[in-house]
């Protein structure tokens, strides 16, 4: 999994502080997660081949997470895209986009497929043979959910030496990698685990933005390889979290710790703070492997 | 009049090529003209005090002219703006903005006042004692109009020597500058033109974007101090103008020449062209005082 941060700042976008958007590359997909104003410029700036994006996941309908979506769709139109585009987001997103396209009298050369959410429990949104994507119910000022991207167990690795010793023809390798036993010419059944070793451990990525501290998500994201959790504030402003429904870096670290996450990525910083280090300084005593999202930064998960 | 170009490129925004937006400073106002995606970032980048913006003029509802508007309004909300904001644009703009604000459950601490246009003839949108703003009907793929900003005649300049010779008390200066005659103590009436000279010539700015070549606008903009006219294409691509309803630089220059404009500002460049000079090279043989709009460039009109 490769995660590219396109924007990671809260609320009011500035020229060097873009609102939330990320691209997750996994299982042959390029998933776009949230799409604040200016996302299409950031995609170009960071050289993301955005014609490859087929699925866009929107966490909630606040502007700093969605106001770049209609512009990106318009650009797809102007570039003559033909591939269908799947958009997953809260109820209302279809009307929001379709109204603007209609008012612009835009010719739509491809199909827009909306999957609008209203569910308040974790819901499967997408699945293929390599990955599945599920909502993570969050608690913000409007209906909001995050997303859990989970790879499925990969193919088993062939033990070539063992295969050759048993005289396995290469024609069977594909099936064996998928877990099949091997039936020798003698009729003897060679169990799969004598011919293979475990495949790569499946990885997972949880995207949690925006939300107040919500420990009831922990069972769902338990053992996640990487957790992005918003950290709009620091402890001195924790009193603002309840009203605005945001979290501190310490609360994000606490979630990561309880969930036994592999790493924590912080973001959605309030513009009142002048240094990113302040966020990792607060998080690391609680959860050591904490990192700051930065516009353009790439995380290998 | 001071015109700041925030963006001047067509269609698909890139990091160094923003879509259309301009700020015109005149008569104590900061008028925002069109508002493509990323306009609020450009306002910050170029140090425009955007809390001073009270009137926003939108030419048409294509994304590259309006998709930055809802984000700017959201930012005004987050910054706690209290001053009413007037938005002038084609019918539909009110629904477009209000739907998005409603879906984001945004608290609106100030009043949004929409003036939606449906008229197909020049229509007065705004007037105070210093300036008036009128639509310029254009011909594009959707309902579009430009805007003509016209200063009203300024105060007359006092001829101080003459005033002193006639013994005019300074208490009368204000009235005389506004055109009043002076009644001396003797009862003699001194005509205003013996006490003053003509004030500064009122200036005007015509914003014409986007449009096919449309010479019937010329009477309305005759003698304009500065004309912005879109020049999406150059002559080798003139065949694209009819279908896309855009103009070439040569056509823009032709309009400027026939309108006896003081200067021509070109913009809305197609991304197929690699140099801005190609636009002025095409325009100047027809209209010498032609200039390219560039992101961040300031024109004193």
Image (cartoon, coloured by chain):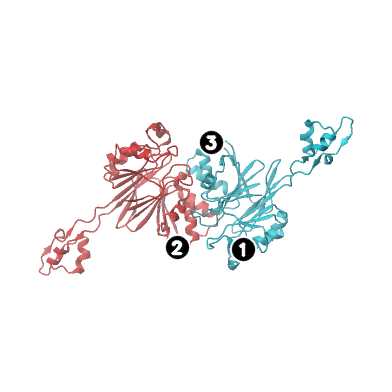
Chain colours: A red, B cyan
Q: Name the residue tied to disc 3.
A: B109
The image position of residue B210, as x and y in percent, is: 60, 57
Q: Is residue B248 visible?
A: no
Whichever of labels 1 and 3 marks the residue nearer the N terminus, that label is 3
The image position of residue B91, as x and y in percent, is: 60, 50
Determine if marks 1 and 3 fall on one subunit.
yes
Q: Name the residue tied to disc 1.
A: B281
The crowd level at tag 1 (other Cα within 10 Å; few <14, some 14-19, many 20+) is some
Q: Nearer the viewer, residue A101 or B260?
A: B260
Q: Name the residue tied to disc 2.
A: A82
**Rendering quarter of residue B177:** top right
Q: Nearer the viewer, residue B275 or B113?
A: B275
Instruction: State whether residue B255 is above or below residue B54.
Output: below
At 17% across and 64% down in the image, what residue appears? Answer: A160
The crowd level at tag 2 (other Cα within 10 Å; few <14, some 14-19, many 20+) is few
At 51% across and 57% down in the image, what residue appears? Answer: B12
């Amino acid at each position: 999994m490769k995660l590219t941060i396109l924007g990671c700042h809260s609320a009011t976008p500035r020229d060097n502080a873009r609102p939330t958007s990320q691209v997750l590359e996994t299982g042959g997909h390029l998933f776009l997660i949230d799409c604040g104003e200016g996302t299409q410029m950031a995609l170009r700036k960071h050289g993301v081949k955005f014609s490859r994006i087929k699925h866009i996941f929107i966490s909630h309908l606040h502007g700093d997470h969605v106001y770049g979506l209609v512009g990106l769709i318009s650009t797809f139109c102007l570039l003559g895209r033909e591939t269908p585009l799947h958009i997953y987001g809260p109820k209302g997103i279809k009307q929001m986009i379709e109204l603007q396209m209609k008012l612009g009298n835009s010719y739509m050369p491809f199909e827009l497929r909306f999957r609008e959410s209203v569910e308040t429990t974790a819901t499967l949104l997408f699945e293929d043979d390599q990955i599945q994507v599920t909502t993570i119910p969050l608690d913000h000022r409007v209906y909001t959910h995050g997303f859990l991207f989970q790879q499925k167990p990969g193919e088993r690795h062939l033990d070539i030496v063992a295969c050759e010793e048993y005289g396995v023809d290469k024609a069977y390798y594909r099936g064996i990698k998928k877990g099949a036993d091997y039936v020798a010419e003698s009729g003897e059944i060679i169990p799969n685990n004598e011919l293979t070793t475990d495949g790569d451990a499946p990885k997972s990525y949880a995207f949690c933005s925006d939300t107040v501290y919500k420990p009831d998500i922990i069972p769902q994201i338990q053992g996640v390889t990487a957790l992005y959790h918003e950290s709009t504030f620091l402890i001195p402003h924790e009193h603002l979290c309840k009203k605005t429904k945001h979290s501190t870096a310490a609360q994000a670290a606490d979630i990561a710790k309880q969930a036994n996450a592999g790493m924590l990525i912080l973001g959605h910083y309030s513009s009142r703070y002048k240094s990113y280090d302040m966020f990792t300084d607060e998080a690391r005593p609680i959860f050591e492997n904490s990192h700051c999202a930065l516009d353009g930064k790439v995380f290998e998960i």
